[in-house]
């Protein structure tokens, strides 16, 4: 990791005092470029005791993250000679937008190096904020690769490097959000949860809050696979992580900054790590409570709050929603993930005899009071079937009883929660085992028992299930692709002729085209 980019430190003062002084001065600069962001009360779902939570909405800033503050503060202090040379930086996306905003406002050319994997939404936002004053250079597969390329460009072209976090002026700019927290009148707080990437925001915010509320518990929050500040605090100095998880891409930094570490080692009370699943759950809570769409790193603080909910009951808590720059496709994947589920869930593979009616027997006998969120099955054996169900329930205790129900009925089962083949919907189907198959697209109303009622009223006794592909989407309409197998073609044709396209509990049931059926049976 390159050394700190700033040469503005005053060695006659302790670093935290320098930083507080610079935050005070940054007040005058940053509001030329943007406006203060609001504080908003957040209520956690559920009847359990909860803290009084106040969220700082940095996702509502002009660049949809807090990063504009540090970049603008740093670039506003360039000399005339430095401004002519231009600036260069590396960023995974949010810092780049801050640099672009300042470049456009100040008329300074900026070259911005970003990993090739940077989401398109962040690239587009950089171009929107910077216009003709910015040039994006995609380089490498990681933030570290982009930093190396940007530093090489700095040496060759002589531009001023604007570091994303390891710079006193950048840290000071980020600290202005803490000044807004103090001025909001909602404090003092008992605990503040601050997400950590390179540590620039955490350093600026923690030192300012600590100077006003010295009894405040300041918790640094990191993803389990990207805890660079925790590693630095353990080692006594910044160290590189051997591996880096990039799910929370806004905080995916392999090594904490030297200056942020020097501050955080004195200001942070402790650090906390959260899993990607816990972050996904927090993103859902933000949507359901505030109608806020957060990027993964923006929800780290709330993930830690939810994790420690019982211990925080009746306390006043501060968290920062640091950004909302998320690719739309990633949002869809998060929404479908197990971690974002509002109900307890479990995925089981259950062994059945491959004979007509056994699937309905299973549903009738064991799934009472449970919700089928996902159903995957393809016939691949003459005498045995292994359908895979993801089951949800409001009460985890009810879900825990399912294995006992299965065993009491003689069903063997296997827990496949989190299994890769289930996640990627790898549903095998042997066409050579089918006699007279028919595939149907079913659109049914998402209510308790609707799917069971369709199978019972339309399928029972007429055919054997040979394929089932259904996943709950959150819509009012559930969609499933169903395969039926008949003993003879005359039975299949008779069934199809009598099948109503609409009926009780379902909106549409149509046979799939011959080409689709052929592809399914030839897998």
Image: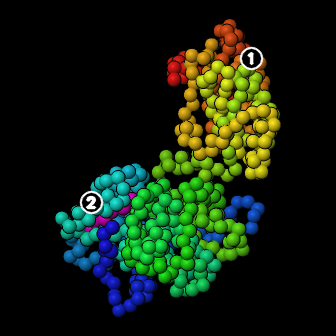
Q: Position of residue 259 (x, y in %)?
A: 39, 77
Any part of residue 31 in sight? no
- From the viewer's side, name the closer residue of 24 and 197: 197
Q: Residue furthest top?
A: 490
Any part of residue 369 in sight? yes
Please name the colour scheme applied to the rendered image. Answer: rainbow
| Vertical order, 517 against 181 (above or below) | above
Is residue 302 inside the magenta stretch? no
* Identity of the residue drawn at 61% across and 16% down: 434
Is residue 89 inside the magenta stretch? yes
Pointer 2: residues within 10 angstroms few (<14), some, or many (20+)?
Answer: many
Horizontal side of residue 89 vs 271, given as left or right = left
Task: Return the residue at label 1.
Answer: 462
- From the viewer's side, name the closer residue of 323 and 18: 18
* Identity of the residue drawn at 71% across and 68% down: 310
Q: Which of the marked residues, 2 or 1, is nearer the chain's N terminus? A: 2
Q: The N terminus lies in which quarter of the figure?
A: bottom left
**Residue 402's quadrant in the figure?**
top right
Q: For mark 2, give the secondary structure.
A: helix
Q: Position of residue 295 (x, y in %)?
A: 51, 57
Q: Residue furthest left?
A: 156
* Identity of the residue drawn at 30% across and 69% down: 2
First to last magenta residue range: 87-94
Horizontal side of residue 216 vs 43, given as left or right = left
- From the viewer's side, name the closer residue of 98 and 161: 161
**Residue 505's quadrant in the figure?**
top right
* Identity of the residue drawn at 79% across and 39% down: 405
**Residue 157's quadrant in the figure?**
bottom left
Q: Position of residue 131 (x, y in %)?
A: 32, 59
Label 2 – label 1 distance at C-alpha? 66 Å
Task: Return the residue at label 2.
Answer: 149
Horizontal side of residue 448 vs 14, given as left or right = right
């Amino acid at each position: 990791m390159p050394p700190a980019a700033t040469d503005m430190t005053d060695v006659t003062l302790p670093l935290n005092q320098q930083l507080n002084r610079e935050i005070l001065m940054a007040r005058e600069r940053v509001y030329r470029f943007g406006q203060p962001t609001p504080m908003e009360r957040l209520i956690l779902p559920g009847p359990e005791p909860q803290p009084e939570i106040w969220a700082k909405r940095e996702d509502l800033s002009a660049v949809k993250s807090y990063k504009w503050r540090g970049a603008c503060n740093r670039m506003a202090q360039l000399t005339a000679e430095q401004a002519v040379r231009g600036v260069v930086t590396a960023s995974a996306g949010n810092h780049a937008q801050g640099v672009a905003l300042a470049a456009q406002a100040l008329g300074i050319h900026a070259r911005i190096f970003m990993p090739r994997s940077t989401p398109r939404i962040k690239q587009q936002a950089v171009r929107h904020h910077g216009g003709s004053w910015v040039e994006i250079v995609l380089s490498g597969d990681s933030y570290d690769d982009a930093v190396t390329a940007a530093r090489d460009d700095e040496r060759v072209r002589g531009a001023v490097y604007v570091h994303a976090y390891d710079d006193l002026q950048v840290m000071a700019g980020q600290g202005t959000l803490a000044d807004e927290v103090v001025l909001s009148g909602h404090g003092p707080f008992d605990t503040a949860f601050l997400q950590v990437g390179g540590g620039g925001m955490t350093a600026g915010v923690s030192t300012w809050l600590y100077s006003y509320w010295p009894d405040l518990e300041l918790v640094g929050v990191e993803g389990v696979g990207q805890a660079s500040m925790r590693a630095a605090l353990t080692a006594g100095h910044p160290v590189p992580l051997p591996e880096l998880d990039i799910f929370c891409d806004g905080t995916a930094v392999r090594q904490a900054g030297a200056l942020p570490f020097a501050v955080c080692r004195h200001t942070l009370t402790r650090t906390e790590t959260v899993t990607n699943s816990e972050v996904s759950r927090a993103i859902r809570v933000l949507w359901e409570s505030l109608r806020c769409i957060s990027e993964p790193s923006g929800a780290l603080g709330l993930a830690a709050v939810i994790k420690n909910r019982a211990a925080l009951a009746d306390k006043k808590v501060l968290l920062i929603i640091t950004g909302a720059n998320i690719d739309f496709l990633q949002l869809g994947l998060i929404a479908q993930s197990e971690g974002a589920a509002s109900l307890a869930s479990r995925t089981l593979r259950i062994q059945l005899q491959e004979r007509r009616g056994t699937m309905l027997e299973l549903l009738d006998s064991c799934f009472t009071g449970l919700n089928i969120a996902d159903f995957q099955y393809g016939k691949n054996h003459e005498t045995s079937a292994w359908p895979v169900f993801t089951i949800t329930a409001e009460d985890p205790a009810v879900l825990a009883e399912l294995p006992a129900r299965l065993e009491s009925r003689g069903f063997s089962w296997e827990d496949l929660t989190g299994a890769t083949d289930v996640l990627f919907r790898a549903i095998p189907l042997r066409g050579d085992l089918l006699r007279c198959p028919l595939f149907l697209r079913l659109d049914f109303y998402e209510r308790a028992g609707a799917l069971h009622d369709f199978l019972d009223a339309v399928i029972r006794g007429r055919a054997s299930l040979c394929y089932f592909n259904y996943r709950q989407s959150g819509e009012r309409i559930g969609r499933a692709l169903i395969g039926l197998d008949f003993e003879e073609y005359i039975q299949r044709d008779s069934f199809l002729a009598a099948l109503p396209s609409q009926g009780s509990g379902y909106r549409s049931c149509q046979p799939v085209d011959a080409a689709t059926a052929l592809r399914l049976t030839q897998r």
